[in-house]
Amino acid sequence: MTVLAEPHSSLEQARILAKAAAFAPPSPRMEDGRLDLVGLSRTELESEIREIGEQPFRARQLWHWIYHHGVRNFSECSNIAKPLQQRFSERFVISRPEVVAVEQSSDGTKKFLMRFRDGQMAETVYIPDLEDARGTVCVSSQIGCTLSCRFCHTGTQKLVRNLSAAEIVGQFMALRDFYGEWPTPQGGTPRLLSNIVFMGMGEPLYNYENVAKALRILMDGEGIGLSRRRITLSTAGVVPVMQRVGEELGVNLAVSLHAVRDSLRDELVPLNRKYPLAQLIEACRRYPGASNARRITFEYVMLRDVNDSEADAKELVRLIKGIPCKVNLIPFNPWPGSSFAPSTPEALERFAEIIMAAGYAAPVRMPRGADILAACGQLRTACGRARRADAEAKNIYCSSPFASPASASEGSIQPMFPSLRR
Ligand code: SAH
């Protein structure tokens, strides 16, 4: 299809990478000259260790202490002699974002405001499973977002910068600290922090290099060891990068679809003007590793009288025909100033029925943490450039980021109508 040649060109990929570089995170080197070891790949860690004249096995030991035991001080590394611990602490640090506020929803969901070294902030959400002792960590990949999806609160916050691999992995590690889940549970031992979704603030595929690096660390079997099956990356449809996710990372893919005609999707998800539906759907068809066991998730936010008609549902079924997938229906989560309303339960049910009748699972994602604005699309911090721009636009929410209509994230996937459970 000629339509695919352009977005897949290496030129287009290079353009995306160049743009990401313009929003680069701060360097891993502290002001005092020490280097942050969190966020380095194994190879980078080894070369740093070699650089200071130590044996490569020290890198493996450190990796294990950092990602398996969760230590933050070299003095806790008991198989490393004191003088070497001292050497390491003069040269290196093991960082964490600082948790500056925690809000608890009545449903157990917790929202964490994280502050990074340069003072910028982002939000991370923990969504406990309602039945089991496990749960999902929803991480942010950027501070702010460039996409401006009309129904998304994060979309009203301009992109401040990308998060580094250390800051992405750090969100998960800070939650492990909070919940006391170190060392990494082994084998079949249940994990409280069992899943990760990249559904917080930002578009992960516009920060692909840092996200990919973070994912390799999160999946490393000698550390945090999360299986790729428990990781989901959500994109609004950055078509030229989607293939790389499948080929290089093999994690689950979720695609924020939200409309089935270009005219409407152009409005709701302006990225559609760059990568329209035909290209997006084709990229899903070609997503490496998609199979009935590993289905793509299409996310569809249900907006009353906007995208929730029976005709929309039928067109959706037509579009996704032949793709191993499921459709995740997300009731719209309102936020102050938003101009949409959630679909009625009847419209939601009818929509789900049409999709299920065509043979696809269509779970409704129960909003989680909505009372603390921690549900999908509600995450938002007010700081830096964005804070100023936003203050001008709305004249609100400047005093405390947390007292404000904060941030955006994700709910776990729960069928809303038990009768629709498949
Ligand atoms: N940029 C990525 C990651 C954000 S994920 C993406 O677009 O996929 C957050 C999910 O919540 C996306 O599917 C997003 O479209 C959806 N969402 C955003 N605002 C929402 C809102 N107010 N109510 C419900 N879902 C929303």
Image: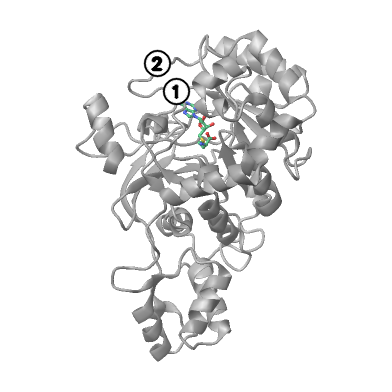
Residue under the image location 46 percent in, 51 percent down: 21
**CB of mark 2 near ligand 1 (< 8 Å):** no
Identify which amino acid the numbered label 1 is placed on. Arg
Where is mark 1, residue-wise?
150
Identify which amino acid the numbered label 2 is placed on. Ser
Q: In this view, does 158 lie to the left or right of 287?
A: left
Q: Where is residue 207 in the image (x, y as percent from the top left)?
A: 50, 47
For disc 2, the neighbor class at 10 Å (few under 14, some 14 to 19, many from 20) is few
Task: Tell me if residue 199 comes above or below residue 422 in the rendering.
Answer: below
Residue under the image location 31 percent in, 31 percent down: 405
Residue under the image location 62 percent in, 16 percent down: 261
Q: In this view, does 349 lie to the left or right of 380?
A: right
**CB of mark 1 near ligand 1 (< 8 Å):** no
Task: Tell me if residue 303 comes above or below residue 385 in the rendering.
Answer: above
Task: Judge by depth and name the residue closer to the eye, 224 or 217.
Answer: 217
Where is mark 2, residue-wise?
339
**Circles 1, 2 touching at the beta carbon (< 8 Å):** yes
Task: Judge by depth and name the residue closer to the eye, 284 or 100.
Answer: 284
